[in-house]
Amino acid sequence: MGYGDYVHWTAIIRDLYYEVNSKDKNDVHNYIVGLCKKVNELNENEKIKIDYGITNIKKTSNSHNFKFYVDIKWKGNIFNHEQAKVIFKNNSMVTDDNSYPNLIYITIKSDGYLERGNVGQITKLYDSKHVVDTYAKNLGLENYNKKGFFNFTEDECNKVKENLPSKKFILIEPQNHKNLESRLLSFDFMQKLVNKIKESNDIEVVQISPSKFADKESQYLENCIVFKDIFTYREAILFGKHSEFAIVPHGGLSIGLAVVDTKVIAIYPCIHKVPMTTYETEIAMEISDGNHYLCFLNKCEKCNQLRNKFSNSEFNNIISKSNEMLN
């Protein structure tokens, strides 16, 4: 599980934070009890196996806001986790300071939208509704926004500003450094998109990629600006905020770009259904034929067939949508 899984939780934490701190400090305990009661009253058809949620509350001050002390199931505190600490960086709603006077303790899961079998394999995805909808229902939260939350630092803002192109640009990311080949569109397909878009538009195209990811070397597109090992994940999201739109395979990048309201053409592999992670700013395009999901094979012939079919049938559609957004 990656960055996007924790971005979903920033939405829940943010809206719980505002809900809790809009109340009289002495009413917060009863509010939390009420949330837990709602969850307990859900029937078995309405909830998944819930092993996350609010676990405790501490109040020793009437002059401090409540903050959240967040642990990840099986993984420890968010600030000790490689990916979660990136997502929650500079977020004043959370803390790892146990001495802070008003705390709500909450346990989260990076994969709280699925069920696994006895040997850990994924047996069911709750992908007919959005991840944040699932989390909110399973925590009893009624008022919330699915869009996540970042609080960018001054250094992050300055770095992005210093590296912005001099003219309008779009962001494109082939994600060719991923290890699961079944999840990827061909590099040639992404290169053809770049060439065709630039052929008829006075626009820069930018690729942001690490030089290596999970011991796999990245490939770099031609005919575009390449930022190689320049930006962190957060900085890449903030950079993308300034783009006209982005074309990316669905994942942590597309979920993060939704936070900053960037228009995204998001291409979904054969993992889950679109409603599970889509946003109003997203044009979702699905490789699956509507039947082939839950595929985590490195090499899958069915995925390969669907990917080739998508590449042949949807290329002109992506170009058309791109031209519409640029004109």
Image: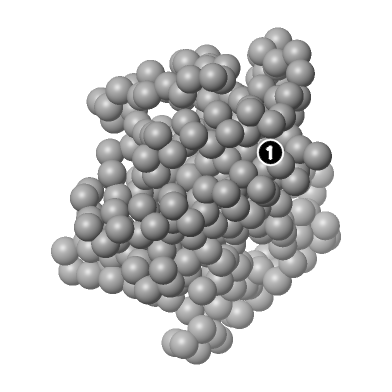
- The residue under the point 66% across, 48% down is 320
For residue 323, say whether it is visible: yes
Give the residue furthest to the left: 119
Q: Position of residue 9 (x, y in %)?
A: 56, 52
- The residue under the point 70% across, 10% down is 162
Task: Name the foreground residue: 91 vs 246.
Answer: 246
State the image quarter where residue 88 is shown: top right
Is residue 262 left or right of 309 when viewed as pictured? right
Is residue 24 left or right of 181 when viewed as pictured? right
Say which residue label 1 marks. Answer: 245
* Amino acid at the residue labelled 1: Phe
| Residue at disc 1, secondary structure | loop
Q: Position of residue 280 (x, y in %)?
A: 71, 57
For residue 97, say whether it is visible: no
* Vertical arrangement, residue 15 with respect to residue 156, above or below: below
Task: Name the foreground residue: 127 vs 208.
Answer: 208
Task: Name the foreground residue: 301 vs 181.
Answer: 301
- Way the structure is coloured: one colour
